Image (cartoon, grey):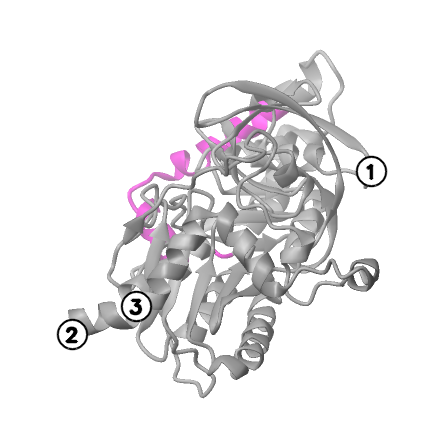
C-alpha cells in the first residue's frame, strides 16, 4: 500500500473520532504559530513507525492491534484514569454500573505504574479474602501487572463464576506480600444497606454509586422512617461511605441533594474557561435529621463529592480517616466500532472551592479503625453479615427453637465489632447539643 495512502487512512479513521469533541477554537489558536510543514510531522512519524513494526517486527501483528496499543499508550500516558477500551472492555465497563458481572469485587486504580486497590466491595470474594484499600496487586496468575494496562488488569481479574484467580498483593500498612487464591462470584450491585442502631438512630451504608443508588437510598430512608415511627420518628443517621470507590457523578449529586435544600454541591472545571456548578434543590422529602458521615482511605471519587458537599455546607460531621483523593471527572465516549474512550475532562471542587485531588477529604473527627480482638487474623474490616442487613430472610428453624436474635442484639454486636461506628453513633446523638454550642 502506498505510504501516502496509508497515512491518509490513518488520519481519517483513527484520529478523527478522538478529536470530534475537541475545542476547535482553542486548537486554531494553538496552531496559529505553527508552519504548514510542522502541522502533520507527528502523524507522519506515527505512520512511519507503524509501517516499520508491521513489516519488520519479529512476529506477525495486525494493524488493529498496533493502533489499539498506540491509543492505550497515548491515553494512559495522560493520567491514571484515562484509557482506551476495546469493544469487550467497553461492554465490561458498562456492566459495572448497570448490571451484574462476575469477578472478585474490587475497585482498582493505576498509581505510579502500580495497580492499587481503591476499595474492596463488601460481601464479595475479595472482601472476604482480606484485600484492603491501598493494597498493591503485583501479579495476576503469575503475570506481572506492570506489563498490563489498567483495563487489561480488570479483564484478567474478571472471569466465569466459580473459576479461580491468583493474586499476589502487597499490603499498604505493613509492606508484606501475600499470595491469595480467590474464587470468582457474581458481584451484586445492590448499593444500600441499613439497620436501626438504637431507638430512632439509623445506620445507612452506601457501597457504590450506580444507576439505581439514589432510588435505593430513598427506599431505605422511607423504611427507616416507618420503623422509627414507634420510637418518635427518625432522630439521626450515620451515613457510611467507607470503602465506597465512587461511581456516577449524577448519583453523587442527587444523593447529596437528599440531605441539602440549597447551596452548591460540587463544581466542575475543565479545559475551557466555563465552570459548571451543581446546586441543591429544596424538596419536600429532604432529610433534615442530624447526620454523621463515615469515610476512610477507600472512600473515593463520588463518595468524596458527597462528603465534601455535606461538610462544606455544615450539614454533617465527617468522621473516620482521610479519603482516597480522586478529584477528577472522566467522560465515557463511545466510538463507532463499539470501543470507547474514558477521558479525564475536568477536576471537581467542593462548595468551598477546594480540590481534593491527591489530598482527600480530611475528617472533622479522625478515628482510626481498630480490628476486633476476636478472630483478628481472619475477620476483614467492617464485617457485615447477612443477618446484619435490613429485611434479611429469617431462618425458620432458629425461630422454632427460640434462637432468633433480636434486632437490638444484632445492632449491639455490629457496634461491638466496629469502633468507628460506635463513635459515630455517639456523635450523631450529641449533634443537636454541638449545634447549640456553635450558635
**Residue labelled with disc 2:** 439
Q: Nearer the viewer, residue 283 or 144?
A: 283
Per the image, label 2 sits on a secondary structure element best described as: loop
Residue ID at (64%, 64%):
406
Specify few, some or many for label 3: CA neighbours under 10 Å numbering under 14, 14-19, or 20 or more.
Answer: some
The residue wearing badge 1 is 162
Describe residue 213's horizontal placement relative to residue 89 as left or right: left
Using the numbered discs, state the Cα–Cα distance from disc 2 to disc 3 in whole angstroms.
Answer: 12 Å
* Image spot of residue 250 (x, y percent): 50, 66
Which of pointers 3 and 1 lies earlier in the amino acid sequence?
A: 1
Work out whether residue 326 or residue 383 is closer to the camera in this orientation and state it: 383
Main secondary structure of the magenta stretch: helix
Q: CA distance from mark 3 to mark 1?
A: 47 Å
Instruction: Find disc 3 in the rendering and name its residue.
Output: 431
Nearer the viewer's eye, disc 2 or disc 1? Answer: 2
Q: Are marks 2 and 3 in contact (CB under 8 Å)?
A: no
User: Quick check: 10 left or right of 345?
Assistant: right
Q: Height in image: 407 above or below 294?
A: below
Which range of residues does the magenta coloring cover?
21-50
Circle nearer the N terminus (2, 3):
3
Quadrant of the rendered image containing residue 313: bottom left
Quarter occupied by the N terminus: top right
Mark 2 neighbour density, 10 Å: few (under 14) some (14–19) many (20 or more): few
Task: Judge whether residue 22 is colored magenta.
Answer: yes
- Could you tell me which secondary element the residue under label 3 belongs to? helix
Residue 309 x/y as whole percent: 34, 64
Determine the secondary structure under disc 1. loop
Q: Tell which circle, 2 or 1, labels the residue nearer the N-terminal end.
A: 1
Amino acid at each position: 500500500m502506498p505510504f501516502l495512502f496509508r497515512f491518509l487512512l490513518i488520519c481519517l479513521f483513527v484520529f478523527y473520532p478522538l478529536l470530534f469533541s475537541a475545542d476547535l477554537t482553542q486548537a486554531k489558536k494553538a496552531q496559529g504559530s505553527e508552519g504548514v510543514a510542522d502541522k502533520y510531522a507527528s502523524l507522519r512519524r506515527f505512520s512511519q513507525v507503524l509501517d516499520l513494526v508491521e513489516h519488520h517486527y519479529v512476529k506477525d501483528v495486525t494493524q488493529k492491534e498496533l493502533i489499539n496499543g498506540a491509543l492505550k499508550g497515548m491515553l494512559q500516558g495522560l493520567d491514571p484514569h484515562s484509557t482506551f477500551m476495546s469493544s469487550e472492555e467497553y461492554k465490561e465497563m458498562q456492566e459495572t454500573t448497570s448490571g451484574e458481572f462476575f469477578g472478585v469485587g474490587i475497585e482498582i486504580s493505576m498509581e505510579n505504574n502500580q495497580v492499587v486497590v481503591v476499595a474492596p466491595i463488601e460481601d464479595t470474594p475479595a472482601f472476604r479474602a482480606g484485600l484492603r484499600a491501598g493494597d498493591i496487586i503485583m501479579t495476576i496468575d503469575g503475570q506481572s501487572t506492570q506489563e498490563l494496562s489498567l483495563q487489561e488488569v480488570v479483564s484478567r481479574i474478571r472471569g466465569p463464576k466459580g473459576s479461580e484467580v491468583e493474586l499476589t498483593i502487597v499490603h499498604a500498612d505493613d509492606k508484606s506480600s501475600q499470595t491469595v487464591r480467590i474464587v470468582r462470584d457474581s458481584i451484586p450491585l445492590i448499593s444500600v444497606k441499613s439497620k436501626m442502631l438504637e431507638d430512632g438512630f439509623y445506620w445507612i451504608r452506601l457501597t457504590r454509586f450506580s444507576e439505581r443508588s439514589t432510588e435505593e437510598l430513598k427506599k431505605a430512608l422511607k423504611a427507616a422512617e416507618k420503623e422509627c415511627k414507634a420510637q418518635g420518628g427518625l432522630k439521626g443517621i450515620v451515613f457510611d461511605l467507607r470503602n465506597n470507590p465512587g461511581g456516577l457523578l449524577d448519583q453523587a449529586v442527587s444523593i447529596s441533594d437528599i440531605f441539602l435544600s440549597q447551596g452548591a454541591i460540587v463544581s466542575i472545571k475543565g479545559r475551557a474557561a466555563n465552570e459548571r456548578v451543581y446546586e441543591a434543590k429544596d424538596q419536600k422529602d429532604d432529610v433534615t435529621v442530624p447526620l454523621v458521615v463515615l469515610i476512610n482511605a477507600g472512600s473515593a471519587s463520588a463518595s468524596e463529592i458527597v462528603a465534601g458537599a455535606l461538610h462544606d455546607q455544615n450539614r454533617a460531621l465527617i468522621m473516620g480517616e482521610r479519603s482516597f483523593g480522586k478529584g477528577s471527572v472522566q467522560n465515557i465516549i463511545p466510538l463507532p466500532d463499539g470501543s470507547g474512550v474514558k477521558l479525564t475532562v475536568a477536576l471537581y471542587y467542593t462548595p468551598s472551592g477546594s480540590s481534593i485531588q491527591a489530598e482527600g477529604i480530611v475528617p472533622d473527627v479522625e478515628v482510626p479503625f481498630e480490628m476486633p480482638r476476636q478472630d483478628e487474623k481472619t475477620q476483614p474490616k467492617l464485617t457485615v453479615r447477612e443477618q446484619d442487613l435490613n429485611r434479611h430472610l429469617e431462618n425458620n428453624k432458629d425461630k422454632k427453637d427460640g434462637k432468633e436474635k433480636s434486632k437490638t442484639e444484632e445492632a449491639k454486636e455490629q457496634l461491638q465489632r466496629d469502633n468507628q461506628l460506635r463513635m459515630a453513633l455517639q456523635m450523631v446523638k450529641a449533634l443537636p447539643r454541638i449545634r447549640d454550642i456553635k450558635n
